[in-house]
Image (cartoon, rainbow, N blue to C red):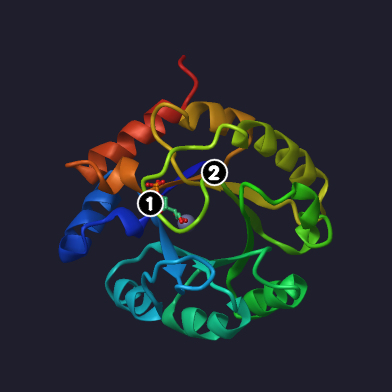
């Protein structure tokens, strides 16, 4: 499995539907929704109403990335709105196990997000209970940042951890991904690539999705 998840944060909100339809035409059927509460990260972004509006019109998978201090309090709203995947930060709560179970009980895939500065060892107690790990390759809070190179070593270690975990979680990487690094990340174990600026920052999002998929493949 390998998928591109265009991140709505980089879209032009005036023409969100046009941009999304273009990405769908380019092969995207999964979209990343960055939810920021102004506390866990400084910005405010979008909420469950956006998820609900998209779900009414488009048959796509919505991957909600909660950058919030109280993930527990947000799960029902997003699940009701139609979220398919919900991830939250290991740094945000001491009750990661409970939150994962709540996400799964609501019928969504549960993901745990981890910041570039947090040791992967903090995932040991929870990795067997998640469907995926969202490995941050930038510090959360803003789109369009530069990719942090230590991600290459971290993804290799994470791939080993996921391989030996009972739930066999998949790896999604988030931040600064483009045609220049996507192949190396895929080679090292990335199965889902979040792409904000490298899709919606381009004049033709559909063509950008196709280029990313192409660039991720080994040349044959
Ligand atoms: C950062 C967000 C990312 C962001 C990625 O806080 O979690 O999902 O939208 O954007 P790019 O791909 O532009 O780095
Ligand atoms: Zn994100």
Q: Is mark 1 within 8 Å of ligand 1?
A: yes
Image position, residue 15 (x, y; %): 16, 61
Image position, residue 167 (x, y; %): 76, 57
Q: Label 1 crowding class (10 Å Cα cut-off): few <14, some 14-19, many 20+?
A: some
**Residue at the spot of label 1:** 143
Ranked by sequence position, the earlier of labels 2 and 1 is 2
Residue drawn where x is 28% and y is 38% of the image: 208
Answer with the quarter of the image where residue 114 lies. bottom right
**Residue at the spot of label 2:** 137
Q: Label 2 crowding class (10 Å Cα cut-off): few <14, some 14-19, many 20+?
A: many
Residue drawn where x is 48% and y is 79% of the image: 78
171 relative to 68, above or below: above
Residue drawn where x is 51% and y is 73% of the image: 39
Do labels 2 and 1 touch, CB within 8 Å? no
User: Is 39 situated left or right of 180 in this image?
Assistant: right
Secondary-structure class at tag 2: loop
Residue 9 got which mark?
none
């Amino acid at each position: 499995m390998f998928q591109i998840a265009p991140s709505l944060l980089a879209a032009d909100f005036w023409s969100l539907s046009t941009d999304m339809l273009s990405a769908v035409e380019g092969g995207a059927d999964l979209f990343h929704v960055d939810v920021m509460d102004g506390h866990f990260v400084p910005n405010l972004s979008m909420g469950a109403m956006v998820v609900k509006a998209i779900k009414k019109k488009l048959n796509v998978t919505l991957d909600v990335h909660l950058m919030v201090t109280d993930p527990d309090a947000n799960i029902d709203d997003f699940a009701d709105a139609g979220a398919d995947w919900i991830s939250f930060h290991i740094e945000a709560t001491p009750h990661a196990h409970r939150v994962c179970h709540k996400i799964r009980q609501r019928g969504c895939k549960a993901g745990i997000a981890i910041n570039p500065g947090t040791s992967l060892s903090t995932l040991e107690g929870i990795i067997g209970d998640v469907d995926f790990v969202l490995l941050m390759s930038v510090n959360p809070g803003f789109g369009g940042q530069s990719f942090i190179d230590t991600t290459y070593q971290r993804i290799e270690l994470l791939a080993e951890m996921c391989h030996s975990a009972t739930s066999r979680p998949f790896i999604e990487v988030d931040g600064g991904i483009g045609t220049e690094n996507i192949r190396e990340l895929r080679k090292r174990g990335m199965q889902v690539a979040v792409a904000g600026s490298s899709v919606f920052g381009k004049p033709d999002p559909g063509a950008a999705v196709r280029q990313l998929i192409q660039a991720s493949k080994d040349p044959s």
